[in-house]
Every structure is written in C-alpha cells, then in structure tokens.
Amino acid sequence: MAKRRGARTGVLDWWQTVLDETKDLVDDSIDRLRDDDEDRGELSGDIADLKKAVAELNTKLDRLASERK
C-alpha cells in the first residue's frame, strides 16, 4: 500500500521551498549591489555624458519651439 503524505508535510515542503527561494533572491541582490559599487566609477562618466546630451537636446528643442512661434 502506498504511503500518503500528510497535508502538514506538504505545507512544510512548500514553506522550505519559499525560504530557499527567498534566501537565493537576497543573496543575488547582495551580490548585484556589491558589483554595482565596483562599477560606479565607470557609470559616473556615462551619467555626465548623458546629462550633457540631454542639455544639448533641450537647447535645440527650445530653439525649434521659439522658431515656430
């Protein structure tokens, strides 16, 4: 005769899976944050370039808008 698993055992298995997945998520998040800290030097140059490009686009848009009037 096959042994039936009780509802309690099923809940415990599910809860263990939830805990394992949550731990993996937290570990991955911490690893990504640490990696981001190392890449900040590279990103600051990119951010400055993007700000400059946005400022230039705003200037061009303002000029075009004033010419349309």
Image: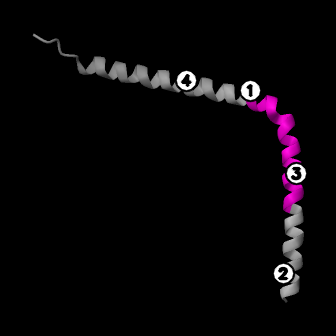
**Residue depth check, mark 4 versus mark 3: number of the one nearer the observer:** 3
Is 13 a magenta residue? no
**Which picture quadrant has residue 10?**
top left
Residue under the point 44% across and 26% down: 18
Label 4 to label 3: alpha-carbon separation = 36 Å
The stretch of residues the image draws in magenta is: 34-54
* Circle number at residue 24: 4
Q: Quadrant of the N terminus?
A: top left
Amino acid type of the residue that numbered disc 3 sits on in the rendered structure: Asp
Q: Position of residue 27 (x, y in %)?
A: 61, 23
Q: Secondary structure at mark 2?
A: helix
Q: Position of residue 67 (x, y in %)?
A: 88, 85
**Which picture quadrant has residue 58?**
bottom right
Q: Is residue 18 above or below residue 40?
A: above
Reading the image, the residue beneath label 2 is: 65
Q: Is residue 10 above or below residue 65?
A: above
Q: Earlier in the sequence, mark 3 or mark 2?
A: 3
